[in-house]
Image (tube, rainbow, N blue to C red):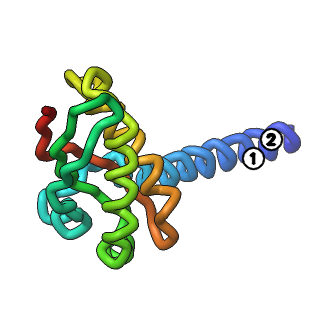
Amino acid sequence: MKNMKVIVILLLTMAIVGAGAMFYLKEPQAEADKKPSAEEIAARSVDTDVITTNLASEDNYGVVQFNILLSTEKAKEEAEKRAPETKAAAISTIAGFTKEQLAGKDGIASLEKELYTKLNEIMQDGKVERVLVTEFKLQ
């Protein structure tokens, strides 16, 4: 009978500790799922200059501007210092597409995804969280 009480107390203790651990571990995840405010986005965003470059298809060019959201304000500072590298990456990315590949929402999404990957390779003190095309013209 005494052993049964010990087992019940141990099981209850483990259940309470487990429930507490789940609550504690779940809390930061809810914080991470929270979307950043407009102020937080502005504090971590960089806009590129308007970029005009030839496309891979003959006699076509694109005019594009990007908004880049970075993981921290320190990463934003790094991105601002690396503006020439960012611009070069954007130009080479755009120039790799044909007019047909860039047409439509799928083309813009492909451009954003490819530039996102290139910029994350450049960054050292943070990471790019999102790349948005904010101006887009094809000729």
Q: Quadrant of residue 46?
A: bottom left
Q: Residues within 10 Å of mark 1 (few under 14, many from 20)?
A: few
Q: Nearer the viewer, residue 56 or 20?
A: 56
Marks 1 and 2 in Cβ contact (< 8 Å): yes
Q: Residues within 10 Å of mark 2 (few under 14, many from 20)?
A: few
- How far apart marks 1 and 2 lie (CA) works out to 5 Å
Secondary element under disc 2, as helix, strand or loop, is helix
* Residue 59, image x, y percentages: 22, 32
Quarter the C terminus occupies: top left
Q: Amino acid at mark 1?
A: Leu
Towards the viewer: 115 or 126: 115
Q: Quadrant of the N terminus?
A: top right
Q: Disc 1 on helix, strand or loop? A: helix
Q: Position of residue 102 (x, y in %)?
A: 27, 28
The numbered disc on residue 40 is none
Report the residue marked by disc 1: 10
Residue 57 picture location, percent across and down: 31, 29
Q: Which residue position holds label 2?
A: 7
Q: What percent of the width, then of the height, locates residue 69?
A: 28, 57
